[in-house]
Amino acid sequence: MNCDRPHAHTRLVRHTFDCGVDEQTRIKGLTVIRRNVKMQSRLIDDILDVSRIISEKLPLDKAYLDVTHIVEAAIEVSGRSPIRRASR
């Protein structure tokens, strides 16, 4: 399928329903389509947020943040020090 064409996803959904594949394959295909639509929607929302930030339509509260506790917690969760991992 050529993704450069408009409405390619619509044809894919239609093909999934029309092409006589077994039910398990059809469900798997629709699950993949659903997941990809959600990811694309998030990506579009993120791009729009960046655009709003750049155009100053979305105000940001700027503040200094001590990330020491965040980094320590991440290291604790990962179970290893990034310094030890890098030295391997």
Image: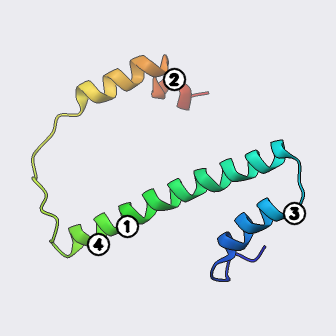
Nearer to the camera, 24 or 65: 24
Q: Are marks 2 and 1 in contact (CB under 8 Å)?
A: no
- Point out the frontmost of discs 4 and 2: 4
Left or right? Give the position of 87 relative to 32. Answer: left
Instruction: State the residue position of label 1.
Output: 47
Q: Nearer the viewer, mark 2 or mark 3?
A: 3
Whole-Å distance between the Cαs marked 4 and 2? Answer: 39 Å
Q: CA distance from mark 3 to mark 1?
A: 35 Å
Q: Which residue is mark 2?
A: 84
Q: CA distance from mark 2 to mark 1?
A: 36 Å
Residue 25 place in picture, x, y as percent: 83, 47
Q: Are marks 3 and 4 in contact (CB under 8 Å)?
A: no
Q: Give the labeled residue for mark 4.
A: 51
First in sequence: mark 3 vs mark 1: 3
* The N terminus lies in quadrant: bottom right
Q: Residues within 10 Å of mark 4 (few under 14, many from 20)?
A: few
Q: Which residue is mark 3?
A: 19
In primary-sequence order, the first of circles 3 and 4 is 3
> Do tag 4 and tag 1 residues touch (Cβ < 8 Å)?
yes
Q: Nearer the viewer, mark 2 or mark 1?
A: 1
Label 2, label 3: how far apart the Cα atoms are:
53 Å
Amino acid at pointer 1: Ile
Q: Secondary structure at mark 4?
A: helix
The picture quadrant where one finds residue 24 is: top right
